[in-house]
Amino acid sequence: MKKEIKKVAIYPGYANMLDDAIFDTSSEAWKALRGLPIFERYVALKDFLNQKGIEVHTYDKYKTQNEIDVWLMLEVTPRNLLFFLWHGIRPNKVIPILLEPPIVNNFEWKYISLWSRCYKTILTWSPDLVKRSSKFLRFHYIPYAFDASRRDYFLSKPKKNLCLLLQSNKASKVKGELYSLRREIIRYFEKRGDQLLDLFGYGWNTPHTRHLGPSKPFYTPLYKGMADDKWETFAEYKFIFCIQNAIPAGDFEGDAFMAMTVGAVPIYLPPPDADEFIPNNTYIDYGAFKDLDALVEYLKKIVDTEEYETYRKNGWEYINSSKFEPFTVGQYAKEVYMAIIEHAKRSQ
């Protein structure tokens, strides 16, 4: 007989997300994200599970671990695995959720053939893993939410410059990383001397980069500091460079969607399966140009023209269409719920 799931616990891996802060879009943890739409997916998940009669909290809110039916482990790391081992939590009660690509969490992917043997159900955005084994179930990344009522406000904001790059000064030795491409773009615009790019984010113009991987200090006059709010900053530029950590199939980060939401045009280097999910008339494909000179000339040519407005129109229509449904937080909640139900069947 299938076990009835009544209580689900989330192990977020970060202390500031405990005490149910991960479900609170007014918490200090949420404010620290500076506009990154991350907690919204967990709010949607909590609402959906509650509607199904399932209680969900961060694990510390439960009086005892024995009352928890299913654990959701956000990312597989040595620290997270040790937590479950130390507390005697059986793997058959745990669903790992893979969020990062190998570039960011190399341990998770390097040893996946070992640790995955312990679990009956694993959630991932990777279509390649789903093909590998039935224990991998797919959710679509990145789960995204936006407030459509703010669209006119974002459109009305004065524009500060032509282009924006809002990313961290990260580094990786793993094949496929795109952090070096971010640096190439910055140096290119720096050498142009016409100040067409503004740079925001962590780790630039500082010697303190150790927490960002094997990153070296990087100094540039294009750096404008930290963005207080990502939505507000995106809305102040015509074009947004959307250079992900890497672009394995299935890994769609949120910058391109955010640019479309606020009325900017994404300059996007998409994953190989992008055409399956994102119309190519909603963004400028970085890879379609022979070099940055050709790209910038194109940007200068179309800005504030009918062609530019068509990109903006197409982007807004797309994220309000049924084709965008896989990336909504509502769909994410459904996919996690279905994984929980499937896991219960497999655990009989």
Image (cartoon, helix red, strand yellow):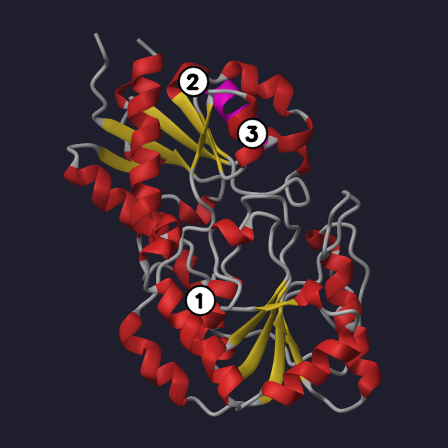
Instruction: Tell whether 194 sits left or right of 156.
Output: right
Query: Which numbered circle lies on residue 185?
Result: none
Whether residue 8 is visible here, answered yes or no, is yes
Whether residue 58 is visible here, answered yes or no, is no
Location of mark 2 (residue): 89
The answer to which quarter of the image holds residue 175 is: top right
Location of mark 3 (residue): 129
Query: Which numbered circle lies on residue 35?
Result: 1
The answer to which quarter of the image holds residue 88 is: top left
- Amino acid type indicated by mark 2: Ile
CB contact under 8 Å: marks 1 and 3: no
In this orientation, which residue lies closer to the viewer: 11 or 132? 132
Q: In which quarter of the image is the C terminus?
A: top left
Residue at image location 53% in from the left, 75% down from the top: 265
Dot 3 lies on which element? Answer: helix
Q: Main secondary structure of the magenta part?
A: helix
